[in-house]
Image (cartoon, rainbow, N blue to C red):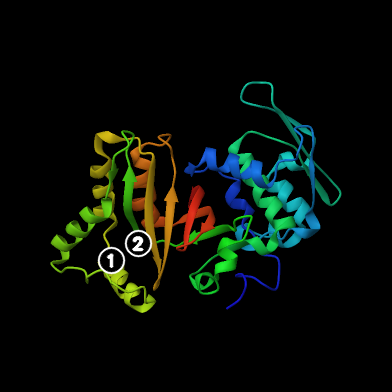
Amino acid sequence: MSAHPHPDAEPELPFSWLADAPLFIDRDQVSAFYDAVVMPEHETGKITLSTRDIRVSRSSTSGKLGARIGTRDLLASLFPFLDAHVALEGTHGREKSTQAEQGDSIELHPIRNPHRQLLQLALHYAAHLPDRVTFAQDESWLDDLDRSFIRDSPRALVFVDLPAGQAIIPLAAELATGRVVAIFDDLVAEISRTVRTLPPHYPATEEPATKREYWRWFSDNYSAIAAMNVLERGIGDGGPAQWVDYRVHLNDRSLQLSLRGRRNFETGIYAYSMIRRGNQHGLRIVGTLKSGPGLNVLAVFEK
């Protein structure tokens, strides 16, 4: 068992994902994580990153662009504000941030926009914490996890590419009223009526093979439409939801996804966009790793 998913090299990260408006972004969590990991000690301070230490996934770029230009120019093509001194007004007109790149370095200054903070987090991890970030394109990365990689600080940053056809199972949601609804129980009943079989009894043991057999029933009999409808009914008039938790199964491995929207997103984001469209087209997810394993989702991008 390796100490982390990519022990031998800095990971190539899909920065092009971040050159898009997110379907979902946890503003509070991104800002708190940014303050804890990236932000300079003083508001007037800055962080300088060397682009020579950052590897951009060429599979996330189009045509010959990624093959013929270096990391500095590739990042500038995705995020033009990284290539020049740009003053960005904050929400209230008082906060400003400038980001500049000269030669092989990028200067990051404090900023309060959560989407830009997420980009700075990714750049900081790629340059200074390459052993705490991974790009998960298939289920194999789950085999390489060990307790230290999950529990060490700062939390590991994970880019997960969920493919089309992925079963996205809603588990539970907290409504705006504070009531928690167990979506999963209703989904079991809905699927059982359709396929006319019952799932195995939930295993009393933590033995991985037994748990995989239990969850395989849901993947084999999954219906995205049923899952979407059950979640919509569960939230009902009690939305917008505080949070929604899901489980995804990558072959025989499972991963929990925790979306903390804090009543900032309509039900359609959690139900139709995440479940129905996510199953049809796939999703791009950026989150921090926790025990389970699971992800505290920072942002979701559509394909």
Which mark is drawn over residue 269? none
Q: Amino acid at mark 2?
A: Ala
Which mark is drawn over residue 218? 1
Question: Could you tell me if the residues under marks 2 and 1 are in contact, i.e. CB atoms within 8 Å?
Answer: yes
Please say if 303 is above or below 163: above
Please say if 191 is above or below 273: below
Q: Amino acid at mark 1?
A: Phe
Callout 1: SS? helix
- Pick out the residue farthest to the front: 204
Choose top left, top right, bottom left or bottom right for residue 5.
bottom right
Give coordinates of residue 17: x percent, y percent.
58, 51
Q: Sequence order check: which comes first, mark 2 or mark 1?
A: 2
- Pick out the residue farthest to the right: 103
Q: In front: mark 2 or mark 1? A: 1
Q: Residues within 10 Å of mark 1 (few under 14, many from 20)?
A: many
Please say if 3 is above or below 245: below
Task: Tell me how many marks there are.
Answer: 2
- Pick out the residue farthest to the top: 93
> In front here: 303 or 114?
114
Residue at (34% x, 39% y) in the render: 267
Relative placement, left or right, of 1 versus 10 is left
The N terminus - image quarter: bottom right
Q: Residues within 10 Å of mark 2 (few under 14, many from 20)?
A: many
Give coordinates of residue 67: x percent, y percent.
71, 62
Give coordinates of residue 192: x percent, y percent.
16, 63
Callout 2: SS? loop
Disc 2: which residue: 167
| Inter-mark Cα distance, 2 to 1 | 8 Å
- Residue 248, visible in the rendered structure: yes
Relative placement, left or right, of 232 versus 253 is left
